[in-house]
Amino acid sequence: MDNINENFEILKKTQENEVAIVMVPFPAQGHLNQLLQLACLISSSYDLPVYYVGSATHNRQARVRANALNPSDIAKIHFHDIPTPEFASPPPDYNALRKFPSQLQPSWDASMLLRESIDSFLRDISSKARRVVVVHDTLMSYNVQDVLSLHNAESYIFNCISVFTLYCLMSLSVGISLQLDEELLKKLPSFEGIITDQLKNLGASQIPYMDIRSGDIHNSSKVIEGAFLDLLAQVASKQEKKQWAIGPILPTKLDCVANRNNMCLDWLDKQPSRSVLYVSFGTTTSFSDREIKELAMGLEQSKQRFLWVLRDADRGDVFTGEDRKIELPEGFEERVEEIGLVVREWAPQPEILAHSSTGGFMSHCGWNSCIESITMGVPIAAWPMHSDQASNSFLVTEVLRIGLIVREWEKREELVSASSIENGVRKLMASEEGDAIRKRAEELGEVVRCSTENGGSSQIELDSFIAHITR
Ligand SMILES: *[C@@H]1O[C@H](CO)[C@@H](O)[C@H](O)[C@H]1NC(C)=O
């Protein structure tokens, strides 16, 4: 009896004194994932209560696709499901030359209806906790504006893009010229047309509410983007916001994670060291039948081993609609049986990249993929599709020099032929130049992984953020 009372007292005390952390993600896979990763990291390493707030559908999406996370860590996150507003969930237009995932726009528009539900949730938590710390996506600034009316709440923006991209976009928007080496500047891809006007407008409608935040968190680190963190600090100095560069803190012991029984990993186990090109274009890219045929032929002709995740882009609601039956060239899978594997399911990407048989990553260069590849020391064959992917691929290939370009951003509306794919793959996987790139990638991966350990820069920054919010 005494024991129960005592426990109850402890429970009550912690709740009253506690700092509650509320994550408010934007409903697109890369964004959902990053805040879920951060939620698990904070709740498991610092033992603080973490809430994850979004529509029921997108919370479910975040949970079922959680990569490289321990189920027991996910179980500690308090998911707050807001009834999902109605929205259209059309299939992607896989024949479109422009790869921007416009089919997601209705789900993004619907997410702008969550303000009231988020406000009432925050009010509730605010009455129970010592302090409420909201960590939100830039694109959810409008929705969390009511933190202003709570006496014990504060908010932070979590940036899901590279510091380099953020620095470029901020400089361009205020008309400051980019502080880049002249040679580099010439090669920088244009930011024209990277997103649609609709998303631009959605972004612009957040600006009036962005000043509410107390600081910024970046999913990058000094060892990856130190120069750009400094440059960003200069551009942003007038804003007087605190900055933390805490990423990437990936679970480094990926072997212990739930996914060990997976066909991709079983297949990789049987391949020689660093021999496999992992091919995946994330959750927002769809290819036409013709493009798939060229890619299949290019991979086959390269004679390199590959693991290809062949999936269509997400719909706004990933639980609706039928999957398209993507056809591969006649007899393809039989012919490549010895050297290639095609997978149509959700794949455990971090574990694949961490696997010693993986020696390259053909990628659209979304920031999640870049971070994972950089951390695991895997060089990238870059094929940017939209949004920040062109500037990420520039960062990876020209600045960090741990990858090469398969398809130039400037040629994004042209068909990529099998022979240029073949050449790109050969160059990365079977040439001296490729070996040099791989070596640099491995070295950077090592440095990045060290930075996430105790005493490393990412860990210090994360500790400093936690110390700040629990002050
Ligand atoms: C940064 O992004 C990577 C890739 O998605 C993720 O694994 C990592 O946990 C993120 N870091 C933080 C601090 O959220």
Image (tube, helix red, strand yellow):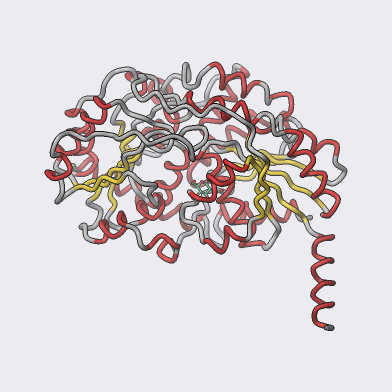
Q: Residue at the location (54% across, 16% down)? A: 197
**Location of residue 118 with respect to 267 vertically, above or below:** above
The answer, for residue 395, to whether it is visible in the render is no
Query: Which quadrant of the structure image shows residue 254?
Result: bottom left
The quadrant of the picture occupied by the C terminus is bottom right
Going by the image, does 46 lie left or right of 247? right
Q: Nearer the viewer, residue 381 or 443?
A: 381
For the question of whether residue 178 can be seen, the reply is yes
Number of dots carrying numbers: 0
Residue occupying the point 23% across, 40% down: 433
Residue 12, position as x, y percentages in the image: 83, 66
Whether residue 217 is situated above or below residue 74 in the rendered picture? above
Query: What residue lies at 66% left-to-right and 30% top-to-bottom?
Result: 236
Q: Where 436 sits versus 452, above or below? A: above
Whole-percent x, y for residue 272 in the image: 20, 58
Q: Quadrant of the N terminus?
A: bottom right
Camera-side residue of 192 and 103:
103
Closer-to-camera residue (140/182): 140
The foreground one among 63 and 406 is: 63
Q: Quick check: 253 left or right of 429?
A: right
Q: Position of residue 87 (x, y in %)?
A: 58, 28
Q: Give coordinates of residue 102: x percent, y percent.
A: 48, 23
Which of the 4 image quarters holds residue 233? Answer: top right
Could you say which quadrant of the image residue 10 lies in? bottom right
Asked if residue 145 lies left or right of residue 318, the reply is right
